[in-house]
Amino acid sequence: MARLRIGSRGSQLALWQAHHISDLLRAQGHTVELEIIKTTGDKITDVALAKVGTKGMFTKEIEEALVENRVDLAVHSLKDLPTELASDFEIAAITARENPRDVFCSVKFVSIEALPQRANVGTSSLRRQAQLKALRPDLQIHPLRGNVDTRLRKLESGDYDAIILAAAGLNRLGKTQLVRQVIPAEVMTPAAGQGALGIEIRHGDTATRALLAFLDDAAARAATTCERALLNKLGGGCQVPIGAFAEVIGVRIRLNALVAHPDGTKVLRETREGDDPVRLGEEVGETLLRRGGDVILEEVYGEGFALPQQP
């Protein structure tokens, strides 16, 4: 049996994810150690993520630990991983997916529709902001950073009438008390890779890859590969107003995708089915660009939001 060192961020959710993978590896008989690594994204807590624009802001320092052989694998929320990894790395496993949808959380209100006029809603995601504003142009959207507990505490203290979070994180942490509505993907398209964990290793580390193979879920890999191919085609990182939600249905993949202006005035949606996840993602991305997605994204970047950079 092997001794495996896991690199992880130190947030409550990141540690849950790392311990989850640790438990599965220990059940296989391996010895597992955990190294907590502070990333750029953890250090910048007072600026909306869309304004930062740092490629791999939640992964760079962990990847450095991989290169320096301080850890053998890294556990990430897949949506934090750039769509194109540097040649030093590979994704050895994509785990079975938690619910990839977003949820509406509130103390007083049961749904987005039930919010009063000009209600204050917290989110730092341009993707969520755009779709909220398309549904309810009157809503006042305010930045919301911090870990899950911090965000929920701000909601409970009355700073916001509602906040939007990922279902997966709340489910994993068992903090679903304030979830009032699971938002359908047709209403709020999730982020590419949301709900899945990506296990990253050094490129060519065949021994570690073999040990992690049991964690790889075929349906989750196909769906998220499709979503990430779309995101890559659009040139987007995880902080731009792009949504992608793919499902494996029999032997086919259905992809729902979105490009939207943050103010909600321009929203493009495209749904298509295919057999090849990468080709489907790229074709839908090309269609969205041709329908005006290129203009929307240029406008977003021109207004001072972060221009995503690929490796």
Image: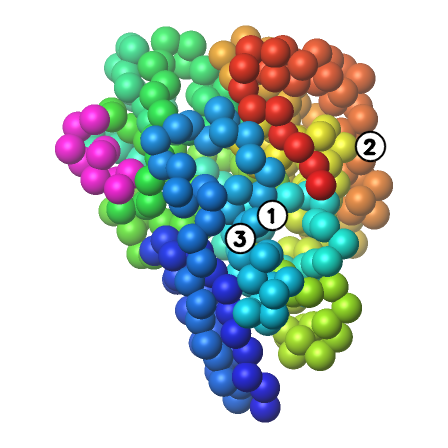
Query: Disc 1 residue type?
Result: Leu
- Work out which residue is located at the far front of the displayed protein and give it: 68
Q: Quadrant of the C terminus?
A: top right
The label on residue 247 is none
Tell me whether the residue at label 1 lies in contact with that at label 3, contact meaning CB atoms closer than 8 angstroms.
no
93 to the left or right of 170: right
The residue where tag 3 is placed is 61
Find the distance from the CA under tag 1 to the CA under tag 3.
Answer: 12 Å
Q: Quadrant of residue 74?
A: bottom right
- Work out which residue is located at the far left of the displayed protein and give it: 157
274 to the left or right of 125: right
Label 3: which secondary element: helix
Q: Quadrant of the N terminus?
A: bottom right
Q: Residue at x 62, y 24 (%)?
A: 307
The residue where tag 1 is placed is 81
Stretch of the chain drawn in magenta = 150-159
The residue where tag 2 is placed is 283
Find the distance from the CA under tag 3 to the CA under tag 2.
Answer: 33 Å
Closer mark to the observer between disc 1 and disc 3: 3
